């Protein structure tokens, strides 16, 4: 690196905080802007894959993330209609000991926030960013006017970024999410993300999601697939209607469903798909969901944001003008982004759609084939984020 840069990052989410930590460590002057008034946890659980864990290792956070999270060795989905397993991905089919972790979003946020601050990044809260100027390197803030100029302005504002002009496709389905205590004597596998389906119209899932802090109880994340246009109806109807449907699909989850006594306990997330090309213009670089938002079907979004953050830091370290940095950043990430955006849009309707054909093919054709070699290691590579070798492009390896 030839000089110290001033870098503005809009968005203190997973990608923005990771980028802030990497870049501040390199000695750059980093300011991260977010609309939140005080740093705080948002949302439910998520899965970190090997790709994301390797990037966390670069920040010295892997062990702490693993201690807070719950190891997930298997993705296991069963058709409620036939009782047959129609999804069975074992991470170990790719490499002995490989697994992802289920972790509370708040835990990931806390680790990255601490790392960014400790590295010297300044976190500027209460700043709602409305626009960016890619030529002058400034952000417009709804209340405070302009921030900058910066040598680089990073858009890490997530799926609804106002700095991304690419059209967002609202997917027909989203999900209701809740974090609940892990039932010790329950029927769930503590090392698997389990799902139950009725065609692709209904889906419920249980994911071990670790604990909020050392000493706290183990948790799980429960999710229920729902059409976006059915959410208002769900809110207006007595909760018992949903509870009956949830128990009917997966009777063993009654012990979880019984803990939900208010609609408010179920957070609704509508899924969106968008890929912003070009990923960079002038001094403005898009990172994470503002570049490539997708449904969480393959559990990749947070991991992709972490990969982006690391790629950006590598490009900044090599140096040059903003356009050189952007070009290297995109070179390292573009093929992986293209591949996973494509795979996620192909897989999502197989599990969440009104199609009759896709789940029929899933259950009768794809499920049996997926058990035959070489499908098991390919599927394990797909869910662990390894297809397209994104770590190799960053000079990293999964075998730390
Ligand atoms: C229900 C659900 C489940 C998911 N499960 C998984 C999973 O299992 N595994 C996985 O890898 N990914 C998962 N994802 C995706 C993952 O959460 C995202 O891909 C990831 O958070 C993207 O990181 P980001 O930094 O781009 O954006 P975010 O983490 O969304 O951060 C964006 C930040 O920008 C701030 N912001 C937004 N607008 C403004 C504004 N105008 N001004 C100032 N600040 C603003 C927000 O407050 C936030 O802090 C899931 C997503 C959802 C919705």
Image: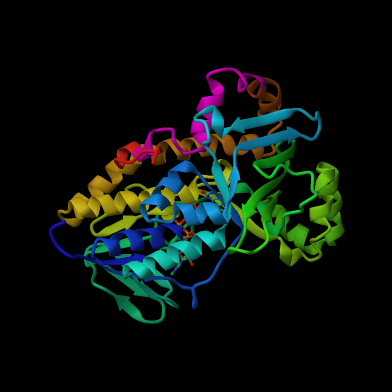
Residue 291 image position (x, y, % from top left): 40, 51
Residue 263 is one of the magenta-drawn residues: no
Extreme residue toward the bottom, this view: 144
Res 291 seen here: no
Look at the picture and state if 295 lies above or below 361.
below
The x, y position of residue 218, in whole percent, is 67, 57
Residue 355 point in image, percent of width and height: 68, 34
- On screen, 28 above or below 200? below
Instruction: Please tell me which residue lies in front, 192 or 41.
Output: 192
Identify the residue shown where x is 54% and y is 39%.
99
Furthest residue toward left: 2
Residue at position x 77%, y 58% in the image: 234
- Dividing the image into 4 quarters, which one contains the C terminus? top left
Taking the magenta stretch, the answer to whether it contains residue 387 is yes
User: In this image, 27 relative to 185: left or right?
Assistant: left
Q: Is residue 131 above or below residue 108?
A: below
* Residue segment shown in magenta: 368-391
Q: Quadrant of the N terminus?
A: bottom left
Q: Position of residue 272 (x, y in %)?
A: 54, 50
User: For this view, does 386 lie left or right of residue 44?
Assistant: left
| Residue 218 appears anywhere in the view | yes
Query: Which one is nearer the viewer's eye here, 374 or 173?
Result: 374
């Amino acid at each position: 690196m030839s000089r110290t840069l001033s870098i503005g990052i809009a968005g203190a989410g997973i990608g923005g905080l990771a980028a802030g930590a990497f870049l501040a460590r390199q000695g750059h002057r980093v300011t991260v802007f977010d609309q939140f008034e005080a740093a705080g946890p948002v949302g439910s659980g998520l899965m970190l894959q090997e790709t994301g864990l390797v990037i966390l290792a670069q920040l010295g956070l892997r062990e702490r993330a693993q201690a807070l999270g719950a190891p997930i060795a298997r993705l296991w989905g069963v058709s409620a209609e036939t009782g047959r397993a129609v999804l069975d991905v074992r991470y170990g089919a790719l490499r002995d000991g490989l697994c992802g972790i289920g972790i509370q979003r708040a835990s990931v946020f806390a680790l990255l926030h601490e790392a960014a601050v400790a590295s010297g990044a300044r976190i500027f809260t209460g700043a709602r960013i409305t626009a960016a100027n890619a030529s002058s390197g400034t952000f417009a803030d709804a209340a405070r006017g302009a921030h900058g100029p910066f040598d680089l302005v990073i858009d890490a504002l997530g799926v609804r970024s106002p700095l991304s002009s690419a059209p967002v496709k609202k997917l027909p389905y989203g999900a209701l999410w809740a974090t609940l205590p892990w039932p010790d004597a329950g029927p769930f596998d503590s090392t698997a993300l389990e799902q139950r389906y009725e065609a692709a119209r209904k889906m419920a899932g249980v994911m071990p999601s670790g604990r909020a802090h050392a000493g706290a109880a183990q948790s799980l994340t429960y999710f229920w697939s729902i059409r976006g246009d059915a959410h208002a109806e769900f809110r207006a109807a007595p909760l018992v209607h949903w509870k009956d449907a949830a128990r009917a699909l997966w009777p063993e989850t009654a012990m979880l469903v019984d803990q939900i006594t208010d609609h408010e306990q179920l957070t609704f997330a509508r899924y969106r798909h968008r890929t912003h090309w070009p990923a960079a213009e002038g001094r403005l670089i898009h990172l994470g969901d503002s570049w490539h938002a997708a449904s969480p079907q393959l559990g990749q979004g947070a991991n992709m944001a972490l990969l982006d953050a690391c790629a950006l830091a590598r490009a900044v370290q090599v140096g040059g003008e903003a356009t050189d940095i952007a070009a290297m950043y995109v070179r390292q990430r573009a093929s992986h982004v293209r591949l996973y955006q494509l795979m996620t849009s192909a897989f999502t309707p197989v599990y969440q759609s009104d199609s009759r054909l896709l789940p029929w093919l899933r259950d009768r054709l794809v499920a049996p084939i997926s058990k035959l070699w070489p499908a098991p290691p390919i599927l394990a590579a797909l869910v662990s984020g390894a297809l397209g070798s994104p770590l190799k492009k960053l000079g990293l390896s999964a075998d730390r």
